[in-house]
Image (tube, rainbow, N blue to C red):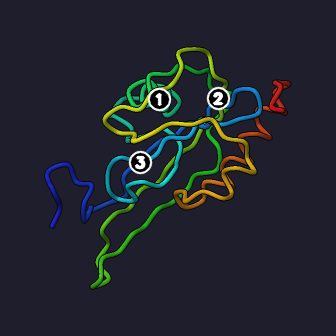
Amino acid sequence: MPTDDGRLFPGRPLIGVSVAVIRDGRVLLAQRAAEPMRGVWTLPGGLVEAGERLAEAALRELEEEVGSRAEVVGPSLTPTEILMRDADGRLRHHYVIHPHAALWRGVEPAPGPEALAVRWARLDEVEGLATTPGLIDTLREAFLRVSAAGEETA
């Protein structure tokens, strides 16, 4: 029952990327405009295109989704697997997301077709939001990565 782009009822997992852009102790969040999980807060991101490296895809998605630019810090973080089933137990969505830590390098973010809203948030503020699965753990890892690279996160 796959759709034309293979996202709904996929025959195999889809590879995605996201980017935790950090600036002055805050991370850039985008509120999802599309299903699944419309309205929840997450990191800018999307699917990897054939021939594209993970970090390149993350930066492309950042620019396409919210218009910002960043610099990736190190290799991808721990992947997040998202599996969603329908009422009959059929696999509706299966994504393997490779998140990246990054430092903001310009252009204030703005909502676009894929984001209802954008915001900069401290880690403690994110804990009170409706977010995509595993987001808080990814953010903790991203802040540690940026801090270990000698960048200021506070």
Give, as a three-letter code, the residue at label 2.
Answer: Ala
114 displayed left or right of 121: left
Q: Is residue 33 above or below residue 51?
A: below
Give the labeled residue for mark 2: 102
Which label's residue is closer to the chain start, 1 or 3?
Answer: 3
Give, as a three-letter code, the residue at label 1.
Answer: Leu
| Residue under the image location 16 percent in, 57 percent down | 3
Indicate which disc residue 72 carries. none
Q: Secondary structure at mark 2?
A: strand
56 displayed left or right of 124: left
Task: Tell how many labels.
Answer: 3
Q: How crowded is the residue under tag 1: few (<14 C-alpha within 10 Å), some, or many (20+)?
A: many
The image quadrant where one finds the N terminus is bottom left
Give the labeled residue for mark 3: 32
Give, as a three-letter code, the residue at label 3.
Answer: Arg
Tag 1–tag 2 contact (CB < 8 Å)? yes
Which residue is farthest top? 106
Which label's residue is closer to the chain start, 3 or 2?
Answer: 3
Tag 1–tag 3 contact (CB < 8 Å)? no
Q: Quadrant of residue 92?
A: bottom left
Give the labeled residue for mark 1: 62
Frontmost residue, 50 versus 38: 38
Disc 1/disc 3 C-alpha distance (Å): 13 Å
Q: Is residue 46 above or below residue 53?
A: below
